[in-house]
Amino acid sequence: MRKKWHRFKNSYFLYSFKRDWIAVASFVVFITLVFVSLASPVLAPYDPYDSSSIDVMDAEIPPSWMEGGEERFLFGTDIQGRDLLSTMFYGMRLSVFIGCGAVLLQAFIGILIGMISGYLGGKVDAFLMRIADVQLSFSTMMVAIIISAIFQVAFGVGRYEELAAPLLIIIIGLAEWPQYARTVRASVLGEKSKEYVEAARVIGLSPRRIRWRHILPNALSPVLVISTIQVANAVMSEAALSFLGLGMPITKPSLGSLINAGFEYIFSGSWWITLFPGILLVIFVLVVNLLGDWLRDVMNPKLYKG
Amino acid sequence: MFAFAVRRITQAIVVMLVISLIGFAIKHEIGDPVRDIVGVSVSVAEREALRDKLGLNDPFIMQYARFVKDALHGDLGHSFFFKKPALDVITAKAPATLELVFVSSLIIIFVSIPIGIYTAINPKNWFSRLTMGVSIVGVSIPVFLTAIILIYIFAVELHWLPSYGRGQTINIYGWESGFFTLDGLKHLILPSIALSSIMLPLFIRLIRSEMMEVLETEYVKFAWAKGLSKYRIWLLHAFKNTLLPVITVGGVQLGILIAFTILTETVFQWQGMGFMFLEAVERSDTALLVAYLIVVGALFVVVNTIVDIIYGLVNPTVRITGRK
């Protein structure tokens, strides 16, 4: 354990990280945001899901530093009288949770398909990659919107809202797997012809073992790189779907549905309900993107950048 | 080349068949045409008779074949809400979306090319650094947030521009256009800026990196050695070769703009196809939803196929593998 830590301390990875102040700053912000969102039940001053603590009379109170603002509500309240700060914390927790879940699902589908397609090659490969190509050409946003629209019509609005969080994970996962499949396939193709694979085959290991225990671990580093950017994409997709009313309901708002709810009141001057969740969303996506950019520069694999 | 084009077009047809199969499956599983036709007070027996008459009890394959045949004749079903053929509803809404996409593409082209070239020529300049920084932030701002901020600043606070709708339109041979009235043009400004904001950072970066690569090549160095004027080298020799990848990526990305019109149109209550699609989802108007899926799918497939074929024309290496 200590040896590993020592090796990590002297690695190029950590060295380049410490030299790049943008990467350090975004990492700090990222960790803070994730911590805040995970600890939101403890940190948030109010519980936005607890309807007994919400008073509609408190609705649309401006942030505390403005005229008419109250000490109790630092960033003001939303249209239902919930403390905006607490609701944002809970909303970000949902966004992060859905984003990470969706990325895990995409990675699972993508790695499986990329692996099969890269290792087997031939007709199977051509067929699977064709599907990925076609789906990518439709843009992930379009596919996600269409799948969620179909789900909503199929389940009915009420049932869809109940199941929104797991459904969103499935929707975004299904919409974005081709990115992973292509990356994994490209890197499997590169690994397949290397000597250690040949050696493993000569020893007489089963193809299955070669595939999962030998090739896959070596093919994973580009996957890690795209994973960061995919988390940002998934959070963005979730926000967009929620904004369209195809995502989280307003009773359990994510950042996207908060922005949507606030938008209806922007004409009466209640800009804070939209702006603060919006800023939080942009900061989160921005730091994840910056970290992803940095990671790509360090690992420098030749990646397909779509 | 001919074989390549044929292969491309065959693939496009296969994709269209798959899309239509998905569309039909949705209609078959979720939509109920009997509900769309009759009211609540019709008895079960009458409903069954109607089902038989409409051929809803036929095998799946037969119904699908009929669906494709109708679709080829331009009949994509009847909208439950509008009480009109779905295709008519869509063609009535299409001009709004297409005008929005058109104006946004113009903005993207005329803003990203000069900035892209400039930042490639002067990579160390403060303006270029600023542009690169802003473009990373720009990628991270969702299009609906840009749209909301624009509305808040220019419509709510400053009262300069209208915040929603298309304004006054003029009917030109059945095409409802907002291009020819001052009001219509004013309504176009904010939505098209919001829509183009999603692609601008990407295009600027693309043009910049391609241009920087070209500026390093031998023939550009040769042109410098020959003593050509710098503008001639930049704009005529270097830029021409940047255009090829930009056009191919651009063609596909412009198709993707259609996906983002759904978001932009929702914010601005723009009466286009995207807005109509979301309304159809809310009203469970399956026929209209499926028709939208097929029309937009066809649009994507046509754009992508044309882009691929053009790419095959100018870059012969792709024809061999038939892959992008």
Image (tube, coloured by chain):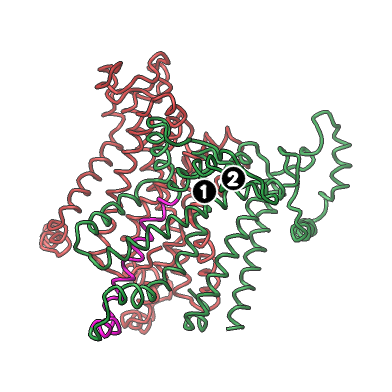
The chain ID associated with circle 1 is: B
Q: Which residue is mark 2?
A: B272
Magenta residues span: B196-224
Q: Which residue is mark 1?
A: B261
Q: How far from the left and from the top, in percent, is residue A23?
A: 20, 53
Mark 1 to mark 2 CA distance (whole Å): 8 Å
Residue at 29% of width from left, 21% of height from top?
Answer: A73
Res. A193 image quadrant: bottom left
The chain ID associated with circle 2 is: B
Residue at 83% of width from left, 28% of height from top?
Answer: B41
Any magenta on residue B213?
Answer: yes
In this rendering, is residue A204 above or below A184?
below
> Mainly helix, strand or loop, the magenta region?
helix
Residue at 41% of width from left, 71% of height from top?
Answer: B243
Q: Is residue A147 rendered to the left or right of residue B215?
A: right
Numbered disc 1: secondary structure: helix
Numbered disc 2: secondary structure: loop
Q: Amino acid at mark 1?
A: Thr
Which of the two residues, A193 or A262, is positioned nearer the viewer here? Answer: A262
Any magenta on residue B190?
Answer: no
Q: How far from the left and from the top, in percent, is residue B321?
A: 50, 81
Identify by letter the chain in green.
B
Which of the two residues, A167 or A265, is positioned nearer the viewer here? Answer: A265
Res. B304 image quadrant: bottom right
Q: Are marks 1 and 2 in contact (CB under 8 Å)?
A: yes
In this rendering, is residue B224 above or below B235?
below
Q: Residues within 10 Å of mark 1 (few under 14, many from 20)?
A: many
Identify by letter the chain in red.
A
Residue at 76% of width from left, 54% of height from top?
Answer: B75
